[in-house]
Amino acid sequence: MSGLSELFSKKGIRHATVGSVMIKFGSAFFTFLNSILLARLLSLEGFGYYVIAFSTVMLLSVPTTLGIPYLITRYVSKYEVHGNYRAIKGLLIKTNTLVLITTLTIFVIAAISYFFWWGSYESELVETMLYALMLVPVLGFGALRNAALRGMKLIILAELPDALIRNAIFTVLIVGCMLLDNTLTPQNAMLMHVIAGAVAFVLGFIFLRRKLWSQIQGLVPEFHSREWIKQTIPFSINSGVFVVKSKSLVYLLAIFGSVEAVALFEVAMRAASLVSFVMDALNLAISPFISSAFEKGRIGEIQRVVTRTSRIIFLFALPVALAFFIGGKPLLALVFGEVYKNSYVPLVILCGAQLLSAVVGSVGLVLSMTGKQGLLSKSNLIAMAAILVFSIPLIRYFDVTGAALIFGCILIIQNLFLLYYVRKHIQVNTTIF
């Protein structure tokens, strides 16, 4: 047990990378398994309702956290380098207070909208949405906790609660529902997700308290509010646009397509995410190390870390993408059910885009961790606008395939543009070459 505890407390990049990949692999497994269970146990329409409700929570996370987790990761890492724990304490107080205010504001707006607009929607969707709102504070405050642990380079402890434990508990609850021979509904599924999220949140809080409390207890907090607000704005735009860019297609499909189209698109996105899950894991692992290296002016160190990371990402992404290219349709039918064979073409498009992103590497991460998040904000805004404008006609004429096409094309174009900037202005090549 002591050996396991020591591994979780390691701050080295090798331990962080290995641990993060292991956790991300477990998270991808349980997330994918949950998708399979939900797709098979819920009707196509019911799964669509669940996806819409959860997408709403993800969209609400934008005004809830305001990009603060990225700010916390960068500044906790920066302040720890200089031993400034008073500033860390001040940062955590300010950011948690802000998230509390935004969460309460969202609840008030939701309560008002419930009495004026929600009555016109299907009761199944409304009830699922109400349960989903309970996830807003759980995920919001959980994101701040994760960010603080990542900034301290405790990557494994940061990712364990939400990435692995929450998804694993959700799986256990769904399977338990099956074994008890209870009918699964979108409402029940969302309530199970809330329970799993609450358990993971409590565990994560315990992790952070044990690792940080002794260092900040009794210190007078130091506030740099003006600097934090200035830096939060581009982080807010980046995180907000990223979520809106991916989740807005769910609403556009529901409006201009159908609830069933939402379910088909979700399955394609979940399957395609397996291509990039190693990228997500390694990005989380290396982000504080890039920030620290940049603070010390070690561009060569950043280059070495990024190059090795990009090659590992591509090594894992290629076989997954090829498997879906070659046998995607029978795999979808076997795993999710016959009705989801219609997700094959969107899946191929999304896998192709993710594979090319793996070749380009972690351009967005390098920009965020080196203080160039302003450019990333602008590119994300343009990408979001392009998706919102071009997706409507594509969805109307090509349905789910149109949504996948616009998402994939914008992802590729944006990554190539950011790669050009990173190579020219930061002198870092993020590609596998």
Image: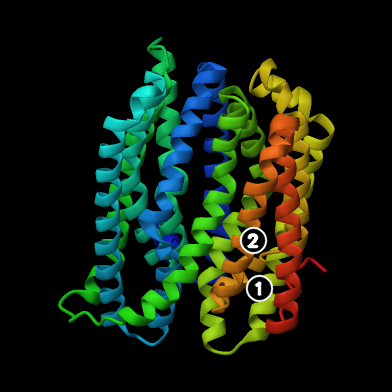
In the image, taking residue 220 as reference, residue 373 lies left or right, namely right
Quarter-wise, where is residue 28 in the image?
top right
Quarter-wise, where is residue 394 in the image?
top right
Mark 1, residue position = 305
Q: Position of residue 314 (x, y in %)?
A: 75, 56
Q: Is the residue 428 above or below the residue 49 in the image?
A: below
Q: Position of residue 375 (x, y in %)?
A: 61, 73
Residue 105 seen: yes
**Regarding mark 2 in the picture, which secondary structure is present there?**
helix
Mark 2, residue position = 382
Residue appearing at x 23%, y 75% in the figure = 216
Q: Position of residue 337 (x, y in %)?
A: 65, 18
Residue appearing at x 32%, y 35% in the figure = 195
Task: Pick whichever, 106 or 12, lies toward us.
Answer: 106
Q: Position of residue 11 (x, y in %)?
A: 46, 70
Q: Is the residue 171 above or below the residue 407 in the image?
A: above
Q: Tell which residue pokes out farthest to the front in this image.
A: 116
In the image, taking residue 420 as reference, residue 186 lies left or right, namely left
Residue appearing at x 74%, y 70% in the figure = 419
**Regarding mark 1 in the picture, which secondary structure is present there?**
helix
